[in-house]
Amino acid sequence: MRIVILGSGVVGTASAYYLSKAGHEVTVLDRQPAAGMETSFANAGQVSPGYSAPWAGPGIPVKAIKWLLMHHRPLVVWPSFDPRLHLWLARMLANCTEDAYRRNKARMVRLAEYSRDALDALRKETGITYDERTQGTLQLFRTQKQLDHVHSDTEVLDAHGVPYELLDPSGCIRAEPALARVRGKFVGGLRLPGDETGDAHIFTQRLAEICARQGVSFRYGVTVEALRHEGGRITGVALKGGEMVTADAYVAAMGSFTPALLAPLGIRLPVYPVKGYSLTLPILDPDGVPRSTIMDETYKVAITRLGDRIRVGGTAELAGFSTVLRAPRRATLAFSVGDLFPAGGDIEKATFWTGLRPMTPDGTPIVGATKITNLFTNTGHGTLGWTMACGSGRVLADLIGGQPPEIDTADLSVARYAQAA
């Protein structure tokens, strides 16, 4: 089968790998000059099935108000008259119930755990390297209140058999020795030993090279203008300049830009760009930095060791498609890493980056078939594109090839929103 994938981020490239491996003729189209150049370029570096959870949950509306009032704010909302934002926020608020949180987290963990296993198998199959580490993630609690409310997450982890450890300060230091220097700044943590880290950009580019050797065609620097359709099927991809690219099936994996492409087809994807930021700084003291990833729960910042660098990622900014780099967001990231690892990295030499995370209101990506018989989606992964990329790509390859996926996928496609309505 001839398949066209729109988008060469980590999700689109992983889809290409599994579809090609299944014997399909795959072409990937992207406006960027290489793979992994947008949201996959400098993300937090986490492959965190255990930390997979929707942003919408009980108490979030109250927490959001507190976050907005903090000096180092995890959440920033710019005034907007955009009806898409208002509808997305309304849908997100509707998911801030206990039942919705448990349902959404359960299916996110299901896909993320499967994806971590798929990544492990891919690594063994290909020998790919990407500054990877398999030493777990530590969610660090600065207050007793944060620690007291961890049970809602651990109940879901228990239900899915995800290993974890609840740690006191000494346990946190055993897991991450550099924290001994700031012992008085935290009360405990939740360690997820099955989580991993790695550079998503390096992974995506090296996986694209592997795909190319398998016969995948990557066409960079091309702009998709529209999907042509007739009789309930896509008939081609119209590119800027007049060219038409045709195939038997099509995969929309363009992140935050996917909804605009599919809207003319009557497919409404509730995906909104949530802007995130990162700093990447060189390591000064190898003993003063994390072994793996620290999640600073107070500021919602991830601090990850990637080879000889520290990646600091966080902030949720609702600002449409703006990619302006804002100094206050940099200050938040710099504060978190400097507060917990004061001598670890050279903040003066840090590079500052921003990307648009494609978020759904229920936290779960939109993976699977659409009402157009030969059109599939693989988008809406939010902060978990790197975590869920391999699992999503493998599931999609099974669905397109008519094979039963190895996990339940009935609640992953866009159809779940119609069912909810």
Image: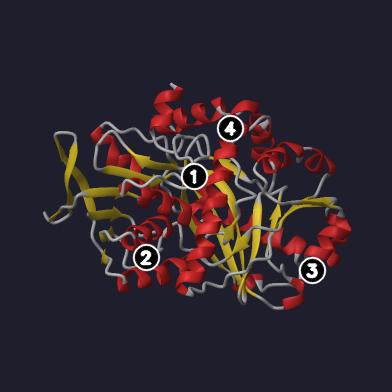
For the residues bearing labels 1 and 3, Cβ distance under 8 angstroms? no
Mark sitting on residue 178: 3
Q: As shown in the figure, which amino acid type bears the numbered disc 1? A: Ile
Q: Which of the marked residues, 4 or 3, is nearer the chain's N terminus?
A: 4
Residue depicted at 42% across the width and 24% down the height: 419
For the residues bearing labels 1 and 4, Cβ distance under 8 angstroms? no
For the residues bearing labels 4 and 3, Cβ distance under 8 angstroms? no
Which residue in the structure is indicated by mark 2? 35
Q: Height in image: 253 above or below 119?
A: above
Q: Which of the marked residues, 4 or 2, is nearer the chain's N terminus?
A: 2
Q: As shown in the figure, which amino acid type bears the numbered disc 2? A: Ala
Residue depicted at 43% across the width and 59% down the height: 10
Question: x and y percent of residue 181 in the render?
Answer: 85, 67
Which residue in the structure is indicated by mark 4? 103
Question: x and y percent of residue 250 in the render?
Answer: 26, 48
For the residues bearing labels 2 and 3, Cβ distance under 8 angstroms? no
Cα separation, mark 1 vs mark 3, equals 38 Å
Residue depicted at 66% across the width and 58% down the height: 194
In what element is the residue under mark 4? helix
